[in-house]
Image (cartoon, rainbow, N blue to C red):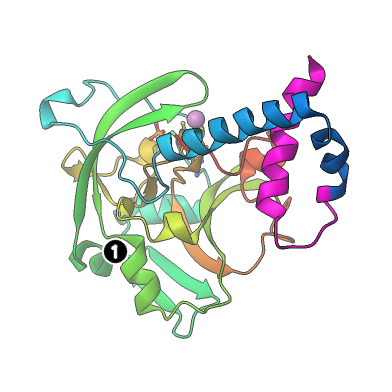
């Protein structure tokens, strides 16, 4: 029974590693010599292929809803208020001087002001937020897409991940998140500064939070104060690509 569970994974690895050298193949060859096992592997291979076709590609849009389907109450979760002196000062001036630097592996680093963020071409979307803690809510989000901003900054060919640095901490650990370039250039990945037609409330991440609609709640970084293009996530805090990934081993790729 255990073997059956392990075999598909091996088969998958073998396929994925084909062309990268024979190392991974050798372990499976012995198993394939048994006709019964070979037959089973073929079936499993067919299943894997069908499964992959059935799953929507990473570029596909997340479902969008009608205005009437928005949740009357969209709860807040995680940190709802970065209690630093700097954040309090920004709150007092309605975030007029909030800046989001776009740095790292870019030819032309940017410093996005709120005016800029509000005047770039906007995308509005009504989507469902799913938190791993077991709740969902539908809300409308508006802001510029991340992709064109990265193009504007001259993203380097070396860049593989985009890191979002947040203004809040849990103890001495800042919240942060990261995504790959498929999600960075996904049309529904936006820097949301509006929620349900109004300025983003503090609890939901004012003045700017990410919406990355093909992933779970914890990837939706709030209080974004920095965007950085990197080649590797090693050396960034715990190295797992996000606060929850570092402290609680949440999956880095939280696709839905
Ligand atoms: N900066 C920051 N971003 C965050 C969090 C957080 O604590 N700090 N919590 C995450 C989690 S687990 C969820 S479910 C959503 C909650 O977003 P909401 O408060 O708008 O409902 O934000 C995510 N982004
Ligand atoms: Mo969450």
Disc 1 target residue: 114
Q: What residue occupies the far front of the structure in this picture? A: 35
Vertical relation: 188 (above or below) 48:
below
Image spot of residue 20 (x, y percent): 74, 62
What is the number of callouts on the image?
1
Please give the name of the residue rendered at 43% of the width and 59% of the height, measured from the top-left corner: 184
Residue 253 coordinates in the image, percent (x, y): 56, 43
**How far across and down, in percent of the image, does residue 256 sit?**
44, 34
Q: What secondary structure is the magenta-colored segment mainly?
A: helix
In the visual, does 89 lie left or right of 197? Answer: right
Seen at 71% across and 45% down, the residue is 13
Name, please, the residue furthest toward the bottom: 107
Is residue 5 located in the magenta-colored stretch of the structure? yes
Location of the N terminus by quadrant is: top right
- Magenta stretch in the rendered image: 1-25
In front of the other: 15 or 63: 15
The kind of secondary structure element at disc 1 is: helix
Residue found at the far top of this picture: 1
């Amino acid at each position: 029974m255990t073997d059956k569970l392990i075999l598909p994974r091996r088969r998958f690895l073998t396929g994925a590693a084909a062309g990268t050298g024979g190392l991974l193949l050798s372990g499976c060859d012995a198993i394939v010599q048994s006709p019964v096992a070979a037959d089973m592997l073929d079936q499993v291979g067919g299943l894997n292929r069908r499964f992959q076709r059935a799953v929507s590609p990473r570029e596909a849009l997340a479902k969008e809803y009608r205005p009437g389907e928005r949740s009357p109450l969209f709860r807040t979760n995680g940190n709802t208020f970065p209690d630093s002196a700097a954040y309090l000062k920004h709150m007092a001036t309605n975030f007029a001087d909030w800046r989001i630097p776009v740095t790292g592996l870019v030819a032309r680093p940017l410093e996005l002001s709120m005016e800029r963020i509000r005047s770039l071409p906007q995308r509005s979307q009504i989507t469902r937020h799913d938190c791993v803690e077991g709740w969902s809510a539908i809300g409308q989000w508006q802001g510029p897409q991340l992709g064109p901003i990265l193009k504007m900054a001259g993203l380097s060919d070396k860049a593989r991940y985009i890191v979002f640095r947040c203004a809040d901490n849990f103890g001495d650990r800042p919240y942060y998140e990261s995504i790959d370039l498929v999600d960075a250039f996904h049309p529904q990945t936006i820097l949301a500064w509006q929620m349900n037609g109004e300025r983003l409330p503090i609890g939901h991440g004012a003045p700017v939070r990410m919406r990355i609609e093909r992933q779970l709640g914890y990837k939706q970084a709030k209080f974004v104060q920095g965007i950085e293009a990197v080649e590797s996530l090693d050396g960034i805090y715990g190295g797992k690509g996000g606060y929850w990934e570092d402290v609680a081993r949440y999956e880095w790729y939280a696709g839905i």
